[in-house]
Image (cartoon, helix red, strand yellow):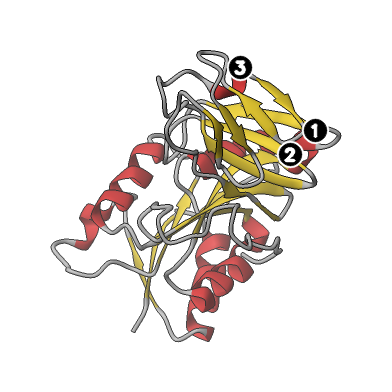
Amino acid sequence: MDRVALGVADGLVERAVRRAAGRRGAEVVTVAAGPSGLGDQDSGPLVVVLDIEAPGVAADVAAWRDRWPETLVLGVASRPDRDRWLSAERAGFDRVVNRGAVGRALEELLTAGRGRRWFPVLADADAAGHLGLVARLGDSPVGPLAVYRVEGAMVCFVDRCPHAGRALAEGVLEGSVLTCPGHGSQFDLKSGARLRGPADEGIALWRLVLRQGRWCLPLGPTSSLAEFPAASAAGVPGDAGP
């Protein structure tokens, strides 16, 4: 039987979680916040529900991720706050909702099960109207990211030149060709291919996916990009799923 770990001390949230879990045949266990309350069990819960506003919640999310990387983390917020929700998702929450939507969100996660995760890079509203370089993100599961819109596609890559490590986002973009500001290596942002040295290899590109108003990076269940195609392949279509 699938389990849901509930780490939120809120009557409304608890009732919604128990109803949703019951409809999906899942057991609900209450925890203080971190995974230590479940003892030495080999398998973790399918979903853990936490309050994004609770003190020390970032450390709690990290502890769940370390103990059971495939457990999905659902965050509950008392009020809408786009920046705070985005920060929570970057800290490791798979999804953040307000108190009134927790039941539906939990059912969706229980239905989806373990699998692809999403790392939110930026809000669609912040990307609107931008061409070329859209954003730079200093911290992500794969390192510093540069986000570009190239011929309608939103792509990202680790912001380091494979030749000498210079930040590529500081270079010049002409069409889809990005020139490194360090030694002039050139890369095609439609495929990641190296067009000119001294770099002797191209760059890995990933196509971002628009989900619920956010441009997200698809990850595997253990925050790995290895399972998913780069932008040079067919790409990943946008969706509105959980």
Residue 191 on image: x %, y %: 61, 47
What residue is disc 2 on?
A: 149
- Quarter location, residue 35: bottom left
Residue 44 on image: x %, y %: 28, 66
Among all residues in the image, which is located at the extreme right? 129
- Give the secondary structure at mark 1: loop
Q: Residue at x 17, y 69 (%)?
A: 42
Do we see residue 81 in this rendering? no
On the picture, is 133 further left or further right than 97? right
What is the crowding at mark 2: few (fewer than 14 residues within 10 Å), some, or many (at least 20)? many
Q: CA distance from mark 3 to mark 1?
A: 15 Å
Q: Residue at x 63, y 63 (%)?
A: 234
Q: Are marks 2 and 1 in contact (CB under 8 Å)?
A: yes
Q: Amino acid at mark 3?
A: Glu
Q: Are marks 2 and 3 in contact (CB under 8 Å)?
A: no
> Does residue 174 sit above or below 166 in this rendering?
below
What residue is disc 3 on?
A: 170
Closest to the observer: 4 or 144? 144
Q: Residue at x 63, y 59 (%)?
A: 235
Q: Quadrant of the N terminus?
A: bottom left
